[in-house]
Amino acid sequence: MTKHLSTIEAFHQFIKDHQLVVVHVMRNHCSVCHAVLPQIEDIVATYPHAELAIINQSDIEAIAGELSIFTVPVDLIFMDGKEMHRQARFIDMQRFEHQLDLMYDSCFGTGDGTLNSN
C-alpha cells in the first residue's frame, strides 16, 4: 500500500516503523515524476514486506534540505531507517529493482539471489 507523507515528522516515523521502505519524491508539475511513479509502484508491489511512501516536494519544501535533494524525481531505499540507495532524475528501473531485491533478501531471507517473483 502506498502512503502519502505530508510532514518531515511523518517521513521519519515511517522509515522508523518499517524495516524496508521505498520513498518516491516528486513535484506537482514534473511529468517525469508522474511517469516514473507507476513503475516504482509496480516494482514495490512485488515485494510484500516493502513499503512505499510518496512525498510531494511541492507540499513539503523542507524535504529537499532534509534529504539533500537537488532534482526530482528521487527514489530512495531505506533499510532499518538508513538510506541505502538513491537514484535521481534518470531512474534506471533494472538497477533500482536489483538494489531493492538485494536489500529484501537481506531483510526477509528469500536468499536465492535472483529478482523476487512474488
Image (cartoon, rainbow, N blue to C red):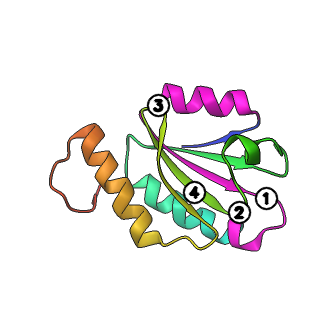
Q: Amino acid at mark 2?
A: Val
Q: CA distance from mark 4 to mark 1?
A: 13 Å
Q: Using the image, determine if residue 27 lies above or below residue 90.
A: above
- Residue 13 magenta-drawn? yes
Residue 68 spot, x, y in % from top left: 68, 49
Q: CA distance from mark 3 to mark 2?
A: 24 Å
Q: Which mark is residue 27?
A: 1
- Image check: 40 left or right of 105? right
Query: For numbered disc 2, what is the local secondary structure?
Result: loop
Name the residue tied to disc 2: 72
Q: Which residues are magenta?
A: 7-33
Q: Would you call the spot at circle 1 few (<14 residues within 10 Å), some (14-19), or many (20 or more)? A: some
- Residue 16 magenta-drawn? yes
Q: Which mark is residue 75?
A: 4
| Contact? badges 2 and 1 (CB < 8 Å) | yes
Q: Which mark is residue 18?
A: 3
Which residue is found at the position 70% from the left and 27% from the top? 9
